[in-house]
Image (cartoon, grey):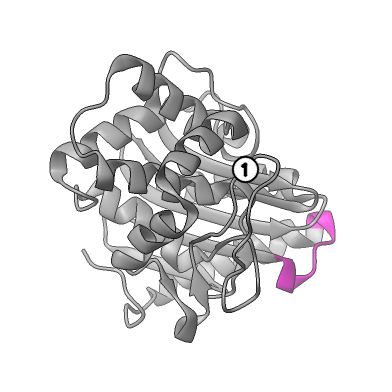
Amino acid sequence: MKLDYDTPVDPVLQGRIMAIDTAIRAKYAIPAEQTDVGVLDLKRGRLAMIHPDSEEYAASIAKVGILLAWFQLHPERPDPQTRHELGLMVKISSNEMATKFSRRIGISEVQRVLDRYGFYDANRGGGIWFGKHYGPNSERIGDPVANNSHAATVRQLLRFWLLLDQGKLVSPAASNTMREIFASPDIPADAVRFVKGLEGRQLRILRKLGSWESWLHDSALISGPGRRYILVGLTTNPCGDGYLEDLARAVDDLLR
């Protein structure tokens, strides 16, 4: 399975995802331009996207770039402490750990790795951008499209999870270790948004969320009986938490 700018959406799935988005937005009175959604059904090869190349301020979702860059530069299996600290960075979104690793790598180097995999294209609306450490006294490099310090689009987040699932980020072994770090069973998940919406469904959820003021996002690789899929939801509304909980439940009901 491949996802690029020419990959068509599945018309049936697209219609159903648009109807789900419309219904949930009506519940919370969220304008259409404040939600971006992506669903990639890995079992059936179906794609649906709403505003796929609309760049949003990413908040902590851009930490996936730090993780990828770390493994690009250190493809060997990390020692237990490094592995745990990377888990804190991605699973509970520790700014302290994110800054520890990004300062070792360097802002420009993180983005260079993201660019290498095609996760950012200024001529196609942008993508995943890392332009600032998550700690104080950081230099800032705004992205060319919207001058965001951290940015993401639905399409490129779908691609990140797809390539990770396919073992195509750095190497199959490194991709597997990154998936293990996202899982990190020793670190409790932040039980909001997708995780809260899917509570009790016996699913394996590898996810990265982002939060800053009204920018409330989630993205995940989700698997369970009868379904495997990637779900991305980006919102710029104070009701984003509720929207994303309902979105996760509705999409899982649709795909299982």
Was residue 71 drawn as part of the magenta stretch in this picture?
no
- Please tell me which residue lies in front, 140 or 81: 140
- Mark 1 Cα within 10 Å, few/some/many (few <14, many 20+)? many
Residue range highlighted in magenta: 27-34
Q: Residue at the bottom extreme?
A: 123
Question: Taking 223 as reference, is 97 above or below it?
Answer: above
Q: Residue at the left extreme?
A: 172
Question: Taking 154 as reference, is 87 above or below it?
Answer: above
Q: Amino acid at mark 1?
A: Tyr
Question: Taking 240 as reference, is 135 above or below it?
Answer: above
**Residue at the spot x=14%, y=43% of the render?**
172
Question: In the picture, residue 206 is in which quadrant?
Answer: top left
- Chief SS of the magenta region: helix
Which quadrant: the C terminus?
top left
Residue 41: where, in percent of width, then height?
35, 56
Which quadrant: the N terminus?
bottom left
Q: Is residue 198 left or right of residue 73?
A: right
Residue 50: where, in percent of width, then height?
56, 71
Residue 125: where, in percent of width, then height?
52, 80
- Numbered disc total: 1
**Residue at the spot x=56%, y=33% of the render?**
195
Was residue 32 drawn as part of the magenta stretch in this picture?
yes
Q: Is residue 91 left or right of residue 46?
A: right
Judging by the rendered image, the residue that carries numbered circle 1 is 134
Element at badge 1? loop
- Please tell me which residue lies in front, 133 or 187: 133
**Residue at the spot x=71%, y=56% of the render?**
24
**Residue at the spot x=38%, y=27% of the render?**
183
Question: In the picture, residue 190 is in which quadrant?
Answer: top right
